[in-house]
Amino acid sequence: MSTPRKQILAIGLNAGVGQQHAELTQERIMETMKEELKKLDQANFELSHHSVDPTLPLETLISEAKKQFQSKPWDGITIGNGVRGNPDFTNIFEKLVNLAIQHAKTADGVPLRMAFPLLPSDVTAAVLRVFPETKTA
C-alpha cells in the first residue's frame, strides 16, 4: 500500500511587490516553482501555492489566506522570505503564522509543520528539513 502524499501549502509574495531580489521576476519564480514541484513530487509531496499581495487591504489578505488554510487538510505550510524577511511585512507574516496555527488542520490530527525557505529554489530543502523522516528518490 502506498503512503499518502503529504499536502504542503506554499505561501509566497506576489512577484514584483516588495521584492528584495530584483532577479526574482514572475517568470523566474514560476520556472523555479515548476522545478521544486517536480522534486517534491518525487519525494511524495503535493504542493499548492498561495500568493500574498501586500498591496491589498490587510483584512482582505488575511481573509484569503484563512480560506486557503481551511480549504483542505495540510501537513505543512511554508512561508517564503519575501513575506518573512521584509520588515515592512512583519505584521503580515505574524498574522499568517497565527492564522496557520489557528485554522490549518492536518488530516491525521498530528501537529502542523511549518517551514521557512529563503528563496523559491529552497522550498524542497525547507520542506524536507521539517519532514526528516521522508526519504527522497
Image (cartoon, helix red, strand yellow):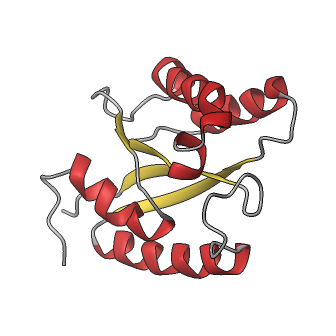
Quarter of the image for the N terminus: give it: bottom left
Residue 56, picture quadrant: top right
Closest to the observer, 127 or 28? 28
Residue 135, picture quadrant: bottom left
What residue sits 22% from the left and 53% below the top?
A: 129
- Residue 23: give x, y in percent of width and height: 63, 76
Closest to the observer, 38 or 86? 86
Left/right placement of residue 81 relative to residue 58 reads left
Left/right placement of residue 85 relative to residue 57 reads left
Left/right placement of residue 2 relative to residue 21 reads left
What residue sits 53% from the left and 72% below the top?
A: 33
Left/right placement of residue 86 relative to residue 77 reads right
Q: Is residue 101 visible?
A: yes
Closest to the observer, 69 or 91? 91
Q: Is residue 4 visible?
A: no
- Residue 136: give x, y in percent of width and height: 18, 71
What residue sits 46% from the left and 81% below the top?
A: 35
In the displayed structure, 26 sits above or below 67; it is below
- Residue 8: give x, y in percent of width and height: 44, 51
- Residue 96: give x, y in percent of width and height: 58, 29
Q: How many marks?
A: 0
What residue sits 31% from the left and 32% below the top?
A: 108
Quarter of the image for the C terminus: give it: bottom left
